[in-house]
Amino acid sequence: MSNSVGVVPSSVMDRKTAILVAMAPANGAIHTPVQLQKLMFVLDKRKVLNKSALFRFEPYDYGPFDKVVYQELENMESSGLIAILRNPELRWKKYRTTSAGQDAGEKALAALGPQQGETVRRLSNFVRSLSFADLVSAIYRAYPEMQANSVFRQ
């Protein structure tokens, strides 16, 4: 399986490229599951990377969720673009780009228009700057419909 991710116009960006673009501003830093789910949700909702939705987010325990995000990350681990950090003591995994994934994400991010690129960087930094509770709360404030099936209490 190839490690290459083509740089494509945002109107036809695929899920793998979108995830790498979203993770690139972190420069290889770890993303938690909630950070990735919420980052991809907001990018999708605002149509920052693609003219049509790449994922089908639904209200879940902690807001917008699509299991396809995790499936794509697993596939990208197999192709050497993502490292998945597993801790048997935790129920969740953590994710970061590999050097190949970082390079591909940076190349695709650089190919975006300046406004798109800045929006991705700002949103990426925002989700990584908040605690779990603050991030989920911020998403619920901005998208109250995503609170429908929540087990999280603010």
Image (cartoon, rainbow, N blue to C red):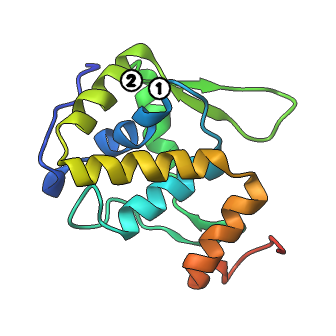
At horizontal 39% and vertical 59% (from top left) the residue drawn is 43
The x, y position of residue 16, in whole percent, is: 33, 40
* Dot label at residue 98: none
Badge 1 density bin: few <14, some 14–19, many ≥20, Cα 10 Å: some
Q: In the rendered structure, which amino acid carries the disc numbered 2? A: Gln
Residue 151 is left or right of residue 78, and the answer is right
At horizontal 60% and vertical 37% (from top left) the residue drawn is 31
The x, y position of residue 25, in whole percent, is: 43, 35
* Res. 146 in view: no
C-alpha distance separating marks 2 and 1: 7 Å
Secondary structure category for the residue under label 1: loop
Whether residue 123 is situated above or below residue 121 in the rendered picture: below
Residue 10 is left or right of residue 37, and the answer is left
Secondary structure category for the residue under label 2: helix
Q: Are marks 2 and 1 in contact (CB under 8 Å)?
A: yes
Q: Earlier in the sequence, mark 2 or mark 1?
A: 1
The x, y position of residue 73, in whole percent, is: 48, 37
Q: In the rendered structure, which amino acid carries the disc numbered 1? A: Asn
Point out the image quarter for the N terminus: top left
Q: Which residue lies furthest to the top in this view?
A: 99
Which residue carries the number 1 mark?
27
* Dot label at residue 102: 2
The mark closer to the camera, 2 or 1, is 1
Badge 2 density bin: few <14, some 14–19, many ≥20, Cα 10 Å: many
Whether residue 48 is situated above or below residue 27 in the rendered picture: below
Instruction: Name the residue nearer the viewer: 82 or 21.
Output: 21
At horizontal 24% and vertical 67% (from top left) the residue drawn is 52
Q: Which residue lies furthest to the right in this view?
A: 89
